[in-house]
Image (spheres, grey):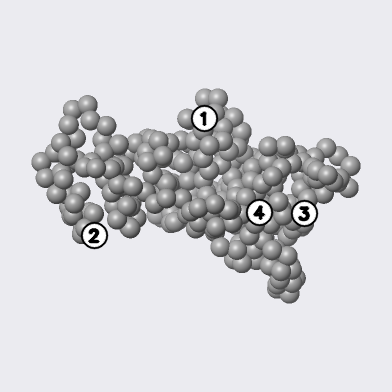
Amino acid sequence: MRAPVARILPLLQVSHLDREFDYLVPDELDSDAQPGVRVRVRFSGRLVDGFILARLTESDHEGRLARLDRVVSPLPVLTDEILTLATEVAARYAGTRADVLRLAIPPRHARVEKDVLAKLVEGPAPAPPVAVGDPLAEYTHGPQFAAAITDGRAPRAAWQALPGEDWAARLAEVAATCVASGRRTLLVAPDHEASFALLRAGQVDAFATDDVLLYGLLARHNVQADFAVVGEFLSYDPYGVMYRKGEPELARLVNDTFHRLAEDGEIERRYERWFLQKLPSGISLDLPMGPQLETLI
């Protein structure tokens, strides 16, 4: 019998919302939406992370249920033991389960997760990548460069692509040669569009840059259903307002304004307007507010 309801613990910062909420599971997410998996749900108009705690045949909520937005990963990571421990730690130290679970469960690592999922299914392991013949055969010293990579050395080269050359394909072939030798590769593309093009073509596994730029690329190319921004921040650069020294009235005005915007919720409303709702261009970034900004507010 199908259980159409998922009881979910959203990872929210405020203590009075440290409780479970019921969501309706769409048919296409039914098989992946199992207890313990990471999900994304809409809460107060914005997307937030969470964990499924249980699947139910019906809900005790009398109103209309919102739909589960996405299963981030079908791999269960929140066990009953971890949830029980997180609940006890949160109660003991006057915290929230969301705060404890962020520390108790490591951030998602797509490559490791892929390996784990491969071991859980029956059948032979996927074949290792096979190097292409000579990815730079048409270039002077190109074969020698590829041979040095295959031998495990660390060659350096300056390469100017021929007119009309598919430089991204050649670069991906060089990377495949490196991977086939038992190593991993990090490719640095000229700009964000070129980097994202490599990802869409399946020539790289991941693309790392500023999260706002990543969400913008997904929205602009209308591929939000095909790709996801995952993992913890690799780095964090805070933004601020700069003004001249020696002007206490201006400093007071800036500080008081930000305090007022935070206290009456205007910052959150403006964030929702520009990062969660549809923009004048017709696209929607669907960029959830980060924990750093939530903490500041």
Residue 199 spot, x, y in % from top left: 41, 40
Residue 129 spot, x, y in % from top left: 37, 49
Nearest to viewer (mark 1 / mark 2): 2
Nearest to viewer (mark 1 / mark 3): 3
Q: Does dot 4 land on a helix, a strand or a loop?
A: loop
Residue 20 spot, x, y in % from top left: 77, 54
Q: Compute the Cα span from label 4 to label 2.
A: 39 Å
Which residue has dot 3 on it? 54
Q: Is residue 240 visible?
A: no
**Which of marks 2 and 3 precedes in the sequence?**
3
**Which of marks 4 and 1 precedes in the sequence?**
4
The answer to whether mark 4 and mark 2 are in CB contact below 8 A is no
- Amino acid carrying label 2: it is Gly
Nearest to viewer (mark 4 / mark 2): 2
Q: Does dot 2 land on a helix, a strand or a loop?
A: loop
**Which of marks 2 and 4 precedes in the sequence?**
4
When the figure is inspected, residue 89 is found, relative to residue 13, above or below; the finding is below
Query: Badge 3 local density, few (<14 within 10 Å), some, or many (20+)?
Result: some
Which residue has dot 2 on it? 152
Q: Compute the Cα span from label 1 to label 3.
A: 32 Å
Q: Is residue 57 left or right of residue 40?
A: right
Q: Does dot 1 land on a helix, a strand or a loop?
A: loop
Query: Badge 1 local density, few (<14 within 10 Å), some, or many (20+)?
Result: few
Disc assigned to residue 279: none
Disc assigned to residue 37: 4
The answer to whether mark 1 and mark 4 are in CB contact below 8 A is no
Question: Residue shown at 56%/35% (left/top)?
Answer: 225
When the figure is inspected, residue 67 is found, relative to residue 93, above or below; the finding is above
